[in-house]
Image (tube, grey):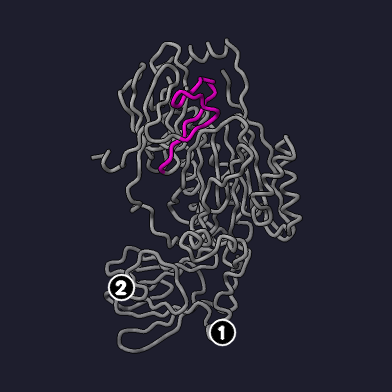
Amino acid sequence: MHAWHLTHGAASDIGLVRRVNEDRYHADPSAGLFIVCDGMGGHRAGEIASSRTVEIMPHHMAEAETDRSLPLIGASRPEFSPATNRLASAVRLANHRVHQEAARRTDYAGMGTTVVAVQLTGAVLSIAHVGDSRLYLIRDGAVQLLTVDHSLVQEQVRSGLLAAADMTRVPHRHVLTRAVGVHPLVDVELGEMAVLPGDILLLCSDGLTAGVSADVILRVTRESADPQAMADRLIALSNAAGGTDNATVILALVSQRPTSLWTRMYAHLVSPPA
Amino acid sequence: MSQHHPALPRLLVRAPHGGTRECDITRTPFTIGRKPDNDLCLEDPAVSAHHARIVQVQAVLFLEDLSSTNGSFVNEHPIERRQLRDADALRFGSHRVIFRDKPGSAMEPALAGEGLVTDKTIVVASTATREASVPARKIGIVEILSGRTGQSHYPLTRQVSLIGAQDDAVITLTGWFAPNTAAMISRKGDAYVVSQTESGKRILVNGRPVQREHALRHGDVVEVAGITMRFVLRDERSYAA
């Protein structure tokens, strides 16, 4: 019998062109929670939106952990687990707070942020995202994108107006169709999957994928076993490719550790089978 | 996003009995209504006291109707919230208003799209239709052939269905030392995948052991933790009926 274990590495960089890093992240392997946000808005409002979101979400998750009756923000979706619905609730709460703050202060008007967040509960990975920050899964020597960008170019690719190869080139590539904080309500896209030992989860802002392709990501994860070394290498490659935007990446390695007989007995005593 | 405009967006306001005036959108939110405290005051009984407003999201202006009695229209479509584009024709009551985004450069079409040639991120409303009208999805169903479980069959409507003794397991095992999660079945569109868990319980599909994960096909027989079950795919609507 085994318990799930996460090791992670994370890095965020301003890039070579921007004057402010509006990306923020949160990484808590013991809670199984990882978040990347890419803020936007005039002056320093973008970093306000992303900072608030990476504070509000873990706080809401921790609060729900201690208080099981904490109300969900927004409707619960029956096809997803309580943990996934809770993660969605955290995004909606962040949206509400950021939107309210933007309404109160004229210099924050229109601020918003993307969010991609994962929460591992047992072997079930909850996924929530809004905007064009991404989640990749590296499994069995292959990389797959688990999120679909909420961007105008993605919609155009889906409807056949734009070739996928041109997505990173067209001038309107930074136009989002959803963001946290911009409207009073946000439509959070949810996902859920079972993890396997050896999986690598990669969360990133669009600044990383602007210069680093999925193939390069795969190569970097093969070259090292240390997630922090992978994260640092990916940021270095992003800057080498021009560093046109802030780039942020979190890598989380999923593994299993054997649990002792005592731990298993204890688990049975504390939460006896229904 | 820079807040200063080389040329302010402008409204050309035409009253019902002739008379045209121009009004720059000098700030946002920019309010429109019958009361004099609005940025654009329209003396029109068909216009509500606070009828509509223009809000800015990054470089983009949106018209929002403020639940007015007679509605706000863009190009004769009633709107609640709509992105404004150069030369849009707005109507409030019997007043007609033309929106000019960049009055100075409007004659130069090459500049029309310049606002998008930027590394700054902006947000627009999605044009995609909601995926509510997806035709006939398949749903996986597990029929229990033998073993101690709560029910005889289980529709796999969840994104991830747990098999085990855990509280939120979909297929509940009731044995004394049943593992919390013995196996998981994940849904990926119309496809289902069974995967191993931390319990290390052996999973057999059609008698063969599963390494890590295995895509399920209609009719597969799955054995795990002392239960035997059959996986079948059904049309979602016929199953619901």
Q: Which residues are magenta?
A: B190-215
Q: Quadrant of the C terminus of chain B?
A: top left
How many neighbours does mark 2 have within 10 angstroms: few (below 14), some (14-19), or many (20 or more)? many
Image check: B198 left or right of A241?
Answer: left
Q: Tell me, yes or no, whether the highlighted magenta stretch contains residue B204.
A: yes
What's the mark number on residue A82? none
Pointer 1: what residue?
Answer: B108
Q: Nearer the viewer, residue B70 or B180?
A: B180
The disc, 2 or 1, on the residue closer to the chain's N-terminal end is 2
Extreme residue in the left direction: B241
Which element is circle 2 on? loop
Extreme residue in the front direction: B207
| Residue positioned 28% across, 43% down in the render | B237
Residue A131 horizontal/vertical position (percent):
53, 53
| Residue positioned 33% across, 29% down in the render | B154
Q: Tell me, yes or no, whether the highlighted magenta stretch contains residue A175.
A: no
Q: Nearer the viewer, residue B130 or A215?
A: A215
Q: Quadrant of the N terminus of chain B?
A: bottom right
Pointer 2: what residue?
Answer: B47
How many neighbours does mark 1 have within 10 angstroms: few (below 14), some (14-19), or many (20 or more)? few
| Residue positioned 58% across, 26% down in the render | A4
Q: Which one is in front in this view, the residue at disc 2 or the one at disc 1?
A: 1
Image check: B107 left or right of A249?
Answer: left
Q: Is residue A174 above or below residue B16?
A: above
Residue A46 horizontal/vertical position (percent):
60, 55
Q: Chain of mark 2?
A: B
Label 1 is placed on what type of residue? Glu
The residues bearing labels 2 and 1 have C-alpha atoms spaced at a distance of: 35 Å
